[in-house]
Image (tube, rainbow, N blue to C red):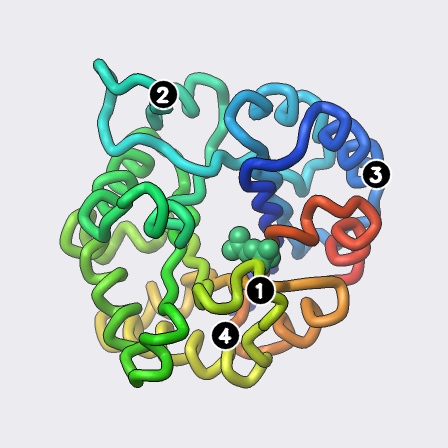
Amino acid sequence: MKRKTIVVANWKMNGDSVLINTMAERLNSLDISPNVTVFITPSSPYLMMANNAFTHKNINICAQNISQFDSGAYTGEISANMLKDLTINYVIIGHSERRMYYQDTNVIIAEKVKRALSNGITPILCIGETEQQREDGLTEQVLVSQLQAVIDEVGLDKFNNIILSYEPVWAIGSGKTASPEIAQETHACIRNFFSKLNKNISAELSILYGGSVNAENSKKLIAQADIDGVLIGGVSLKVDDFSTICSTL
Ligand code: PGA
């Protein structure tokens, strides 16, 4: 089975209404392969504007984070059911910047995944090791513990409705992309972990790569057997580069 190719634009705390309109104008008329699905992930105040602006059938709008709680006195937070109410059907959960700066632990991330799924929202779950962990030979152990926390909370079967993104922390925003070979090796290790638990889930699971992806390296990364797409930060803010990636994959 051929898994679809996924391209996620993670704008982080960047972008504005001008970028939404310029990017939408370019992407809406772009020839994007039917096998490619694009996710635009603006900051939350811009979700609805983006939802209205991007009209290409291959483009979806995605949020960057949700609360682990359903509702209540949590000032500044956004709930999964609010996204659902706004017809936003995707959310990034567990990005390393959330893990690093906002104390999103494995347990909190697992709760967020559960909230998303119970509201019919597909999580794009990010996992990844730090440079030190890789140097210490702990990559597999770290990734498995990040995954196991989510499996323990929501159950393995739910991975039918989860998109994974492997993002080595040392490659994010650093210009140090994992080589296609290193990325493939880690993706294969992740798929193998699932394969031991359930072959169908493993075969169907989309595993994206994130970390200094650009117009030059994206094709080589996606050509790897176990890399099903890319999650792009910095370069996704550049209209020319990002549209080239979307139209050439
Ligand atoms: P980057 O960000 O492409 O700027 O390295 C990647 C990410 O958000 O994971």
Secondary structure of residue under mark 3: helix
Q: Can you tell me whether the CB of the residue at mark 4 lies under 8 Å from the nearest atom of ligand 1?
A: no
Which percent across, then down, holds residue 29? Answer: 85, 38
User: Dot 4: few (<14), some (14–19), or many (≥20) neighbours within 10 Å?
Assistant: many
Q: CA distance from mark 1 to mark 3?
A: 27 Å
Classify the position of ligand 1 by quadrant: top left, top right, bottom left or bottom right. Answer: bottom right
Q: CA distance from mark 2 to mark 3?
A: 32 Å
Q: Amino acid at mark 4?
A: Asp
Q: Nearer the viewer, mark 4 or mark 3?
A: 3
Rendered residue at 59%/72% (across/down): 177
| Label placed on residue 226 | 4
Q: Which residue is mark 1?
A: 174
Give the camera-side residue of 36 and 132. Answer: 132
Rendered residue at 30%/68% (across/down): 143
Q: Amino acid at mark 3?
A: Arg
User: Dot 2: few (<14), some (14–19), or many (≥20) neighbours within 10 Å?
Assistant: few
| Label placed on residue 26 | 3
Q: Is any part of residue 213 visible from this angle?
A: yes
Q: Can you tell me whether the CB of the residue at mark 1 lies under 8 Å from the nearest atom of ligand 1?
A: yes
| Label placed on residue 76 | 2
Counting labels gives 4
Which percent across, then down, holds residue 160? Answer: 35, 53
Rendered residue at 23%/52% (across/down): 106
The tag earlier along the polypeptide, 2 or 4, is 2
Look at the image and tell me in which quarter the C terminus lies.
Answer: bottom right
Q: Is residue 26 left or right of residue 125?
A: right
Decide: marks 4, 3 in contact (CB < 8 A)? Answer: no
Q: CA distance from mark 2 to mark 4?
A: 37 Å
Q: Nearer the viewer, mark 1 or mark 3?
A: 1
The tag earlier along the polypeptide, 2 or 3, is 3
Which percent across, then down, holds residue 169? Answer: 44, 64
